[in-house]
Image: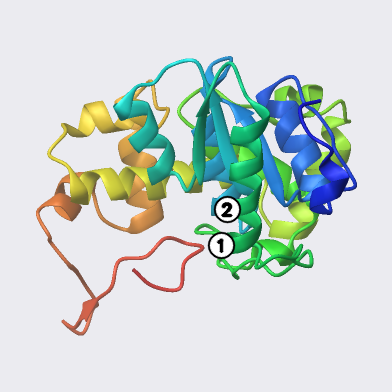
Amino acid sequence: MLLDWSNYGISSIITAGSYVEAVDKAMDLTPHIALVSLHLGKYEGYELAAHMRSIGLSTIFCILAEENDPELIRASMRCGVQDYLLYPLHAEEMQHFLARTLAHHLDGTQPEIGEAKKRLDPVLGVEYTDLSKITNKIILLVRSNFRAPQTLTAIAAELNMSAKYIGRVFIKDTGLKFSEYLMSYRMLEARKLIVSTQEKISVIANMVGYVHLNNFYTHFKTYFGVSPSALRNNTPTHAPDGSVSALGGSHEKSL
């Protein structure tokens, strides 16, 4: 309501009242620009920006916040947010944001959908553009909340769709059941934490959504062919002929 958006070549405007609704609509519209509140229920607005960028969307994000907190600003910028504006909003600030965005990020024009940099899904090893919108929505929700219990039924309810239907679409696109994809993504996140931090294995298991440590150890050893402790100690696996082989998950080409 502050601006005449048509003056900036913006012809379509949609709104969303929650994180899930934002994911749903953004995947369908693939917006060029997104104005996002800092707090989105249990999520943060900059998390939405990070997750949308992780699947290849080139949307320009601007966080709208009440807190002038340097830590929150840095967190936003680390997630790829281009600007951080404070309430109450003023037309002049919005004009400056749009001018900078058009000049520096959109080159004065609106990019064609699909111009986003090609990115591969870490589990599947395929480009997100090769997957359906439904599958991309599911993956986005997994990435944003993989530490919590997740079921396809719950995601289907949030998207107002049939669990059986989206389950069939997901398997057709990925060759994996939802539970298999979720487990694989958790394993990859666990591996990153194991090699980049000194957190206890039990803590990492909990951080990636495992309540029972034995289940975590079993899944990790099955997926990577090596225990979490051995990976941390840089213990390589050895082929029967004595040669050293790379560690890799069942859906990865290499480590």
The CA span between labels 1 and 2 is: 6 Å
- Three-letter residue code for mark 2: Arg
Q: Nearer the viewer, residue 90 or 236?
A: 90
Residue placed furthest toward the left: 233
* Residue 60 in the figure: left or right of residue 17: left
Position of residue 13 measured from the top left corner of the image (x, y, whole percent): 85, 38
Image quarter of residue 143: top right
Image quarter of residue 142: top right
> Measuring 35% from the left and 57% from the top, which residue is drawn there?
224
- Three-letter residue code for mark 1: His
Q: Nearer the viewer, residue 112 or 140?
A: 112
> Measuring 61% from the left and 62% from the top, which residue is drawn there?
103
Position above or below: 216 against 173 = above
* Quadrant including the N terminus: top right
* Quadrant including the C terminus: bottom left
Position of residue 111 measured from the top left corner of the image (x, y, whole percent): 74, 66
> Measuring 9% from the left and 54% from the top, which residue is drawn there?
233
| Residue 180 visible here | no
Residue 100: which disc?
Answer: 2
Q: Nearer the viewer, residue 71 or 116?
A: 71
Residue 104: which disc?
Answer: 1
Position of residue 140 measured from the top left corner of the image (x, y, whole percent): 63, 42
* Residue 83 in the figure: left or right of residue 93: left
> Measuring 42% from the left and 60% from the top, which residue is drawn there?
249
Question: How many other residues sit within 10 Å of disc 1, few (<14), some (14-19) or many (≥20)?
Answer: few
